Image (spheres, rainbow, N blue to C red):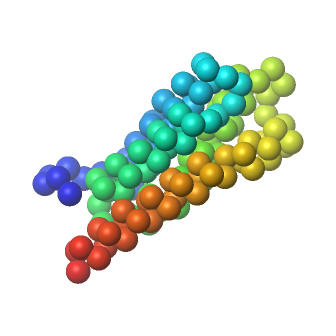
Amino acid sequence: MAPGVTLTGAGAVLLMAGAGALGAATDILLGPALGTATTIMLAVGTVVAAWLVRRRNLFSVVIAPPLVYLLLIVAALLLASDIGVTLTGLAAALVYGFPAMAIATTLGVLVASGRHVAAR
């Protein structure tokens, strides 16, 4: 970890949300749904957040990717959909977004585990 550079748990989650939002904006500009750019940016944001967060706040980074993705879905549905947020639309987006959530969570767990083991 870089000396002197740490994030709180909330700061790490905001970093993840910001990175995911950049990806989501790119995806929305290119098509009607969240896709590859969102997945990549959420994963990168999660890795960077797990690397920079204080050790005692690592758990917040590990559990946050699905919650951040849900926030991104709701924002995308509100901004890009004519009908707004419906239960059916939300459920479909969550199903199709599972790989993005799984990839980001797995990378967060790997980085957090590595930091935890290295600190022992």
Residue found farthest to the bottom: 120
Q: Is residue 67 above or below residue 27?
A: below
Task: Provide residue 112's location: percent of width, then percent of height.
Answer: 37, 66
In percent of the image, x 53 and y 34: which residue is there? 37
Q: Quadrant of residue 74?
A: top right
- Can the viewer see residue 67 in this picture? no
- State the count of labels: 0
Comparing 48 with 74, the one in front is 48
Comparing 107 with 8, the one in front is 107
- Can the viewer see residue 20 in this picture? yes
Residue 90 lies left or right of residue 54; in this view the side is: right
Task: Provide residue 25's location: percent of width, then percent of height.
Answer: 55, 25
In percent of the image, x 63 and y 52: which residue is there? 99
In percent of the image, x 20 and y 57: which residue is there? 1
Q: Quadrant of residue 34?
A: top right
Residue found farthest to the left: 3
Residue 17 lies left or right of residue 78; in this view the side is: left
| Image quarter in which the C terminus is found | bottom left
Task: Provide residue 88's location: percent of width, then percent of height.
Answer: 86, 42
Q: Is residue 22 above or below residue 43?
A: above
Residue 45 lies left or right of residue 104; in this view the side is: left
Q: Is residue 84 above or below residue 117?
A: above
Task: Provide residue 41's location: percent of width, then percent of height.
Answer: 47, 39
Q: Quadrant of residue 85?
A: top right
